[in-house]
Image (cartoon, helix red, strand yellow):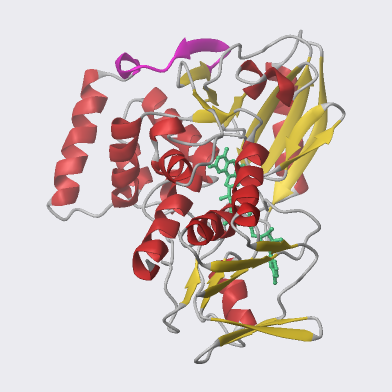
Amino acid sequence: MKAGIVGAGLGGLLAGAYLSSEGFDVEVFEKLPFAGGRFTSFSYKGYEVSTGALHMIPHGKRGPLGRMLREIGCDVEIVDSKPEGEFLLNGERELLTKESFTKLDVLKLNLEFLMNKLGRKRTLEEFARGLSERSYLYVRSFLGWSFSISPEQMRFEKIVPIFRRTELYGGPGIPIGGCKAVTESLAEIIESNGGGIHLRREVKAIKPGEKHKIFLDGEERKYDVIISDVGHKITSELLGEKHADHPPESKGVKYTVAIDEPFIGHTGVLFVLGKSIAGMNEVTNADENLGRKHMLQIHQPLRNGTKEEIVQGLREIREILRGYSFEIIAVQSYKGDWPVNRVMAGMDMGNRTKYGSIYVVGDGAKGDDIEVEGIALGVRKVLEDLL
Ligand SMILES: Cc1cc2nc3c(=O)[nH]c(=O)nc-3n(C[C@H](O)[C@H](O)[C@H](O)COP(=O)(O)OP(=O)(O)OC[C@H]3O[C@@H](n4cnc5c(N)ncnc54)[C@H](O)[C@@H]3O)c2cc1C
């Protein structure tokens, strides 16, 4: 069976690595000169500045992605974060533990789970408004950090499976070598199984048929299966169709800060409460090779994507890091065709198309989990169909 894959992001590479391990003849086409999409990095000023991701795997080594990586022999080491998180509120830091939340807030959460089961449909904002101020700010910060959205943009029921998986697998982990180590290892698996990764080869069109066709510049190739890793919108365009009502993407900005001394000092996330920036991590505490000194990555969800929002984020960073010797080495904004998520969290559009063996993977076609874990669950669904 021949599988043609459009896009060498995490979704495309994971699907390709799996299928090539199962004997499929896999060809991946990537329009850029590098593989990995938003899950790789470049060395800049001595720091591994990523193309997107904050070098984190949401459920660490035990989660859906970690498990799939092990299944196909991808030997990337994932260091689970310890502690998983901390709060920063009004200049004070406090470890994030179960005791961080009042008994009343925990009771309200459990009640909301129950009411949700019984059919109550509310946004996270409607639920979180009833919590203590600190818990409310934490919900805002968590959603801003993880999804680049605010609580009014997500329905409560969409967070339930993510919450349950976090209980099951725990919090985040950092791959040694950063996100690039994961995508590079997947690319190696494809190649070692005889597959091909063709860089600088933009797919111009897809034509469904008994054998599906991929059109490249001046060439067409035929496949039994096509897996698109470019989201539903671009996939529809490649198929010559218009996607009638495509949900919005999520926007954000990432600041990479080189800092002489550790600011966070551990491998977990520092959630920043009550600010426009949502949180930060310092992955050099897990892998010192990710930076010449220490590297802070700070994430801010963007409402409108304006310059004023970024100016505000920069102001907050300078205020928080006052007294430290640091340099902001990259400010990268994510919107349009290179967003934080191709579809806002909780609005994912599934992996199937109307063409049977043409599938969509990647963010925007996630299973019901967070970030690359959701991508892994989505790829798993496609594999269940194919294998
Ligand atoms: C700032 C930021 C921080 C993040 N942090 C994290 C994190 O810490 N942990 C986490 O789990 N997730 C994180 N994410 C999300 C994660 O990076 C993405 O969900 C994931 O990398 C997306 O992978 P993908 O395979 O869906 O798509 P992509 O990585 O976008 O890959 C799609 C590929 O297709 C190529 N392509 C597009 N059109 C064509 C065409 N016509 N022909 C050929 N190739 C084409 C593109 O060039 C690209 O390489 C973050 C995202 C951002 C933006």
Image position of 206 (left or right of 128) = right
**Of 61 and 137, which appears nearest the observer?**
61
Residue 185 vertical position relative to residue 288 in the rendered view, above or below = below
Image position of 84 (left or right of 183) = left
Where, quadrant-wise, is the C terminus in this rendering?
A: bottom left
Residue 72 vertical position relative to residue 218 in the rendered view, above or below = above
Q: Residue 33's spot in the image, x, y percent? A: 81, 57
- Identified at 87% across, 29% down, the residue is 45
Image position of 309 (left or right of 162) = right
Q: Quadrant of residue 181?
A: top right
Q: Residue 150's spot in the image, x, y percent? A: 48, 45
Say if residue 303 shows up in the picture.
Answer: no
Query: Which contiguous range is marked in magenta?
Result: 89-100
Say if residue 323 shows up in the picture.
Answer: yes
Residue 298 vertical position relative to residue 267 in the rendered view, above or below = below
Query: Which residue in the rendered view is the most extreme toward the bottom?
Result: 210
Q: Quadrant of residue 217?
A: bottom right
Indicate whether residue 91 is drawn in magenta. yes
